[in-house]
């Protein structure tokens, strides 16, 4: 619970620091330049870029600490989306993604959290950090579990001089865990507030699964998300769209701690793409 509290306390400040402070700095630099200081416009852009990278690294460090102290596993994926689809999926290069994942049940319910780091920026530096953290609460023998969740992140644009934030999402609803054969599953339905330029009031349905087969040598897991959001995030045009995202995983457990496997990202209408895409990865995992 201590790590969860630290994460929730620091995350808003990290996001504010990353995107507000560079603007303040650029205004100071501009004022100096206007006063006759020798700073050039190129130096200004460089300082903004260095400042943004510093904040990304700071965010990565704190999130890594939050994710690994009580982490369940660490995954490393090779993502070949550029080789498969080129610029159609907004990926100018293939890249590695590191994932810190934690699931912790307790007497009051359970906490789930993961943080993704995409190494897709210049010189293979981290270019995107995205996190989700969710909490479900047990209320006696009541079969439904109140569910709250936060999603959000930040990133840098490759070969450009600016960064961006992934709009935050705030969810509240009810979850229901159940078992189907060898599969331990959970589902929830939630109201979802997407913090776009024009706030989007939406709904999301999620189902997750985990299973161990072949005497523990094979593990299956993953999730399926279906949610709505505004077609136009600025609010100029009206209307909603439906987005699908699923990431089934398969692992061969070499030992109880080390595994080799793959994940397939299945998506439709996701991240600006209006088509269906299937993107497999080659991955390793270490269980703590």
Image: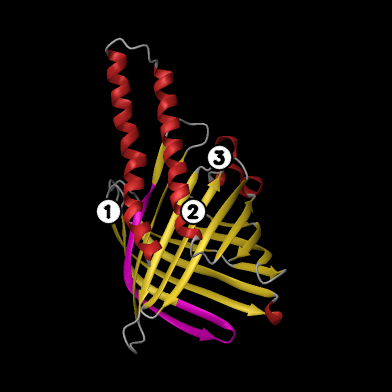
The residue shown at (33%, 65%) is 171
Disc 1 crowd rating (10 Å Cα; few below 14, some 14-19, many 20+) is some
Judging by the rendered image, the residue that carries numbered circle 2 is 64
Q: Quadrant of the N terminus?
A: bottom left
Of marks 2 and 1, the one in the foreground:
2
Question: Looking at the image, which is closer to me, 258 or 19?
Answer: 258
Q: Is residue 162 left or right of residue 78?
A: left
Question: How far apart are the two marked residues, 1 and 3, measured between alpha carbons?
Answer: 32 Å
Callout 2: 10 Å neighbours few (<14), some, many (20+)? some
Depth check: give the residue in front, 142 or 192: 142
Is 165 in front, or is 70?
Answer: 70
Q: Quadrant of residue 192?
A: bottom left
Crowdedness near tag 3: few (<14), some (14–19) or many (≥20) residues, C-alpha within 10 Å: some
Q: Residue at horizontal 38%, vertical 57%?
A: 7
Q: Position of residue 148 (x, y in %)?
A: 33, 68
Query: What stretch of residues is rendered in magenta?
Result: 166-186
* Residue shown at the point (68%, 78%) measured from the top left: 216
Q: Is residue 178 left or right of residue 7?
A: right
Dot 3: element: loop
Residue 49 horizontal/vertical position (percent): 44, 31
Q: Position of residue 141 (x, y in %)?
A: 34, 90
Secondary structure of the magenta portion, mostly? strand
Instruction: Check disc 3 and report the residue beneath it.
Output: 125
Q: CA distance from mark 2 to mark 1?
A: 30 Å
> Mark 2 and mark 3 in contact (Cβ < 8 Å)?
no
Q: What is the secondary structure assignment of the residue under circle 1?
A: loop
Q: Which residue is mark 1?
A: 199
Point out the frontmost of discs 3 and 2: 2
Marks 1/3 in contact by CB < 8 Å: the verdict is no
């Amino acid at each position: 619970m201590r790590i969860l509290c630290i994460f929730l306390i620091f995350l808003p400040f990290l996001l504010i620091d990353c995107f507000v402070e560079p603007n303040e700095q650029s205004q100071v630099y501009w004022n100096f330049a206007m006063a006759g200081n020798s700073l050039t416009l190129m130096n200004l852009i460089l300082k903004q870029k260095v400042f943004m990278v510093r904040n990304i690294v700071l965010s990565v460090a704190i999130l890594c600490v939050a994710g690994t102290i009580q982490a369940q596993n660490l995954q490393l994926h090779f993502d070949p989306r550029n080789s498969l689809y080129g610029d159609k999926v907004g990926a100018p290069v293939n890249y590695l993604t590191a994932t810190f994942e934690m699931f912790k049940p307790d007497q009051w319910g359970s906490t789930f959290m993961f943080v993704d780091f995409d190494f897709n920026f210049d010189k293979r530096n981290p270019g995107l950090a995205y996190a989700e953290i969710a909490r479900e609460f047990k209320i006696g023998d009541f079969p439904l579990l109140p569910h709250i969740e936060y999603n959000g992140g930040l990133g840098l644009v490759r070969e450009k001089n600016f960064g961006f934030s992934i709009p935050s999402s705030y969810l509240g609803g009810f979850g229901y865990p159940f078992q189907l054969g060898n599969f331990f599953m959970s589902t929830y339905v939630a109201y979802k507030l997407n913090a776009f330029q024009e706030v989007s009031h939406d709904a999301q349905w999620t189902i997750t699964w985990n299973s161990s087969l072949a005497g523990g040598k094979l593990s299956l897991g993953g999730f399926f998300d279906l949610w709505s959001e505004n077609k136009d995030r600025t609010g100029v045009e009206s209307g909603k769209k439906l987005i699908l995202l699923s990431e089934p995983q398969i692992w061969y457990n070499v030992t109880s701690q080390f595994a080799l496997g793959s994940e397939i990202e299945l998506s439709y209408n996701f991240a600006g793409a209006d088509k269906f895409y299937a993107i497999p990865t080659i991955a390793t995992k270490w269980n703590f």
